Image (tube, rainbow, N blue to C red):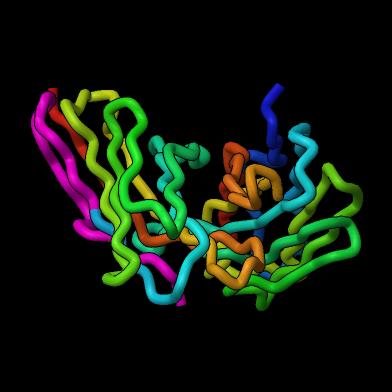
Amino acid sequence: DADVTQTPRNRITKTGKRIMLECSQTKGHDRMYWYRQDPGLGLRLIYYSFDVKDINKGEISDGYSVSRQAQAKFSLSLESAIPNQTALYFCATGGAGDSGANVLTFGAGSRLTVL
Amino acid sequence: SQQGEEDPQALSIQEGENATMNCSYKTSINNLQWYRQNSGRGLVHLILIRSNEREKHSGRLRVTLDTSKKSSSLLITASRAADTASYFCATRGSSNTGKLIFGQGTTLQVKP
């Protein structure tokens, strides 16, 4: 099994629908992240969490919400999806070990298309 | 805005040649990391260099860091067709927030 599992891998939905992307990890890491990737824009940070009670906004949090249900689970929700949220979404985990280097392990990605 | 800016955006070379990618960033950092992404897949960590280091090697990879210029370079020597991928730099700020901010990436094509 993968260290970081994202579901669904692909999703097509319509404008206005609520969507949840789920992420689970077996790395035992405290830190979890959601990034969005668009062509030519690299990865942009949406939300991140350092433990179950800690949630932080990233660069582009508007239109998104997250829930850290457990140390191993971090879900991203789009309450009312819009077409410009069409993108490839990545979940990542990072440990505070190794002197706090924070090397990330990524999931395989969730491709979301909003029509 | 994004921390890292990468140059060039795209690079095409022949197998066996060296590939150099550059990354510039804006604020002081704790460390800088390079990641690789095969088309449409998740990113994979390649190498990390700390702010007090100037050069790091890992196999065919060589990373340099110049904190005075706020820039880093990734050199892949003796490239192979399998090195074809996108390469991203990512910076962790010195304020210890734990955030990792990525650049826009360089797309490398290695022709057999």
Q: Residue at x 23, y 41 (%)?
A: B75
Which of the pair A87/A108 is nearer the observer? Answer: A108
Which of the pair A6/B64 is nearer the observer? Answer: B64
Q: Residue at x 80, y 67 (%)?
A: A55
Q: Is residue A55 visible?
A: yes
Residue B104 in the image, given as x and y percentages of width and height: 37, 60
Residue B79 in the image, given as x and y percentages of width and height: 19, 28
**Horizontal side, residue A43 vs residue A104: left or right:** left
Residue A54 in the image, given as x and y percentages of width and height: 84, 65
Extreme residue toward the front, this view: B52
Residue A82 in the image, given as x and y percentages of width and height: 61, 70
**Horizontal side, residue B69 vs residue A39: left or right:** left
Q: Residue at x 76, y 37 (%)?
A: A25
**Horizontal side, residue A110 vs residue A8: left or right:** left
Q: Dividing the image into 4 quarters, which one contains the C terminus of chain B?
A: top left
Rendered position, A35 above or below B24:
above
Magenta span has B53?
Answer: no
Range shown magenta:
B1-21
- Picture quadrant where residue B58 is located: top left
Q: Residue at x 79, y 51 (%)?
A: A74
Which of the pair A54/A89 is nearer the observer? Answer: A54
